[in-house]
Amino acid sequence: MHPSLYRGFIAQMQAEFASAYLYLAMAAFCAQKGLQGMAHWLRLQWQEELKHALKFFDFLLDRGLAPVLETLEQPPAAWESPLHLFEHVLRHEQAVTARIHELYQQAVEVRDYPAQVFLHWFIEEQVEEENQARTIVEQLRLVGQEGVGLYLLDRQLGERGPEED
């Protein structure tokens, strides 16, 4: 693997671990606010992000390279509202998408075909991730920040089951 692409994969693995850490902090915030459905949804996101990080970890090992683990920064602990929190989720997922696209472009430039194939899964996954976040943001804008609408949306998000690999 080209050294710059290797560094990019390490950075993306780190970003996936940081995403997991962020979603767990968000889950704690929602749970403290009595939004157990949102907390459940975010805990599942936490689990997904850990799986994503491990995909990079294992891919590097499969290529005979050492995954390097770095320190994670502390995520925020509070948000103004559920809407503000999920707008943060959407912006975060859009940033992850941009990083994946940059990695893919780099893999194309250095003609690393296994990396390109590997990254295809993430490209498709990011379409789904952004769509889910965008939908929740739109629903929160429709129902408002309190009352029955928020209660029902929270309950709906609590029905989410784990994703299949």
Image (cartoon, rainbow, N blue to C red):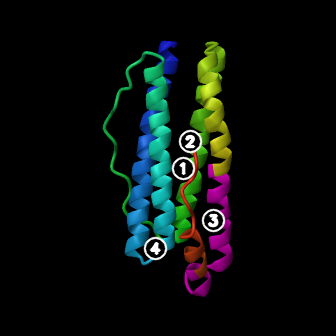
Q: Amino acid at mark 4?
A: Gln
Q: Is residue 66 visible?
A: yes
Q: Which residue is mark 4?
A: 36
Q: Which residue is mark 1?
A: 92
Magenta span: 129-151
Camera-side residue of 161 and 134: 161
Q: Amino acid at mark 1?
A: His
What secondary structure is marked by label 4? helix
Q: Earlier in the sequence, mark 4 or mark 2?
A: 4
Q: Which residue is mark 2?
A: 96
Q: Earlier in the sequence, mark 4 or mark 1?
A: 4
What secondary structure is marked by label 1? helix
The image shows residue 31 at horizontal and vertical percentages of 40, 71
- Classify mark 2: residues with Cα within 10 Å, few (<14), some (14-19) or many (20+): many
- Classify mark 3: residues with Cα within 10 Å, few (<14), some (14-19) or many (20+): many
Q: Which residue is mark 3?
A: 137
Whether residue 147 is situated above or below residue 127 in the rendered picture: below
